[in-house]
Image (cartoon, rainbow, N blue to C red):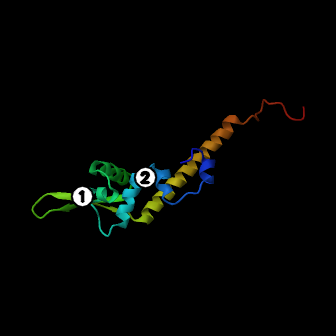
Amino acid sequence: MPDSMSEQLQQDMECEGLLECFHGLKQLDKECFQSLVDADEPLTVDEIAEAVDRERSTAYRAVQRLLQTGFIQKEQVNYDQGGYYHVYSPTDPTKIANDMQRMLNDWYAKMGQLIQEFETKYDRTDATAPSAES
């Protein structure tokens, strides 16, 4: 990922790059998310691990990051004899897109404030400066 904003604007990005850009998700996180999108039904962590060919504990950490960012949802399934397990499914893409848009709007407002602070801090024109007519 490029370091500066000007580099980012010059780079060709794909929509999946938003996952990294907005939430700092890793390649494995994106693979786990894609496995859930491709699945016909919710998956367990073991099934996700198998889909991305990783150890269960590694897949579990990716699933936790996806849960934390709101990209996936967790549901508890109860056994008839007692006990339960969890399955995971992707969050509605419209909700994810709305959340990213809201985050982008917040970021834009914050950058606007910082630009204004920069201008105020480094503006050399003030009442004590000699005028250009002198």
- Relative depth, front residue between 9 and 105: 9
Q: Is residue 84 left or right of residue 91?
A: left
**In terms of sequence position, does the residue under pointer 2 or pointer 1 come before the other?**
2
Mark 2–mark 1 CB contact (< 8 Å): no
- Mark closer to the observer (2, 1): 2
How far from the left and from the top, in percent, is residue 93? 43, 65
Q: Quadrant of residue 85?
A: bottom left
Q: Secondary structure at mark 1?
A: strand
Q: Amino acid at mark 2?
A: Gln
Question: Looking at this rendering, what residue extends furthest in the left direction?
Answer: 81
62 left or right, relative to 82: right
- The answer to whether residue 71 of the structure is visible from this angle is no
Task: State the image coordinates of residue 129 (x, y, percent, origin top left).
Answer: 80, 30
Residue with the mark numbered 2 = 27
Identified by mark 1, the residue type is His
The residue that appears at 21% across and 62% down in the rendered structure is 77
How far apart are labels 2 and 1 at the CA level?
Answer: 23 Å
Q: Residues within 10 Å of mark 2 (few under 14, many from 20)?
A: some
**Callout 2 secondary element:** helix
In the picture of the structure, the residue carrying the numbered disc 1 is: 86
